[in-house]
Image (tube, helix red, strand yellow):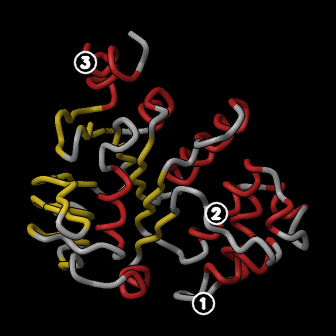
Amino acid sequence: MALLEVDGIDVSYGAVQVIWDVSLSVEEGETVALLGANGAGKTTVLKTICGPLTPAAGDIRFRGESIGDLPQDEVVPKGVAHIPEGREIFQDSTVRENLTLGAYAHRDGMEERRQEVYDLFPRLEERAKQRAGTLSGGEQQMLAIGRGLMSDPELILLDEASLGLAPVLVDDVFDAIEQINDEGRTVLIVEQDVHNALRVADRGYVLESGEVSLSGSAEELSEDERVAASYLGG
């Protein structure tokens, strides 16, 4: 049984269907990449997994339990953290306060988890008393990831972590994703940066116009002519 199973979901915004019969799975300990161009439906899939959206058909299971119709505040305590595109940190709160707010669903061991975040991102410890809105874009992304880790998740849903970052910071963020996975957390990452996503992923799915068009190991997708032509500049 996979940690996460998405089974044939359809998703609509009002009367407009945007996801058709999407299925994917994530095994415990894996990093899986969900790839595709802007507008392909990747973010919609993540929002449906974690609760803001509900599938019109199909099911989503986490550790075998159906979570497809649960709101986000009931999904998070089960061990799922969503780090959204755009970061959505609390701009007027300090770094430390943002991390504390991330632990609302799991307060036991909060200080230990905060130190783990600081070990992963030392710059956040240096800026612990600084207002989040004054951080650089890269530091804000580190804070968004750190805040997600504060709920002690088994599964991290990471949406466009590299968006808008300078190349050197992109490398830092993907290195952190690798470290998070190496430390035992499972990751489902949505990315337009296909090269880096496949560098850190075990497997991947390609989403086109709301449907899965390809799937395979990271190596297989890296070598696929269609992926190379569309996303890798081949």
x and y, in percent, of residue 130 in the image: 90, 69
Farthest-out residue, top: 234
x and y, in percent, of residue 36 in the image: 34, 37
Question: What's the distance in space between the residues labelled 1 and 2, CA to CA?
Answer: 20 Å
Q: Nearer the viewer, residue 4 or 43?
A: 43
Disc 3 and disc 2 in contact, CB within 8 angstroms: no
Tag on residue 143?
Answer: none
x and y, in percent, of residue 217 in the image: 27, 32
Task: Name the amino acid, label 2.
Answer: Ala
Above or below residue 99? Residue 40 is above
Residue sitting at x 58%, y 68%: 149
Q: At numbered mark 3, what does the secondary structure look like: helix, strand or loop?
A: helix
Tag on residue 108?
Answer: 1
Tag on residue 226?
Answer: 3
Q: Nearer the viewer, residue 94 or 125?
A: 94
Q: Which residue is mark 2?
A: 144
Q: Nearer the viewer, residue 210 or 78?
A: 210
Residue sitting at x 38%, y 9%: 234
Q: Quadrant of residue 89?
A: bottom right
Q: Badge 3 local density, few (<14 within 10 Å), some, or many (20+)?
A: few
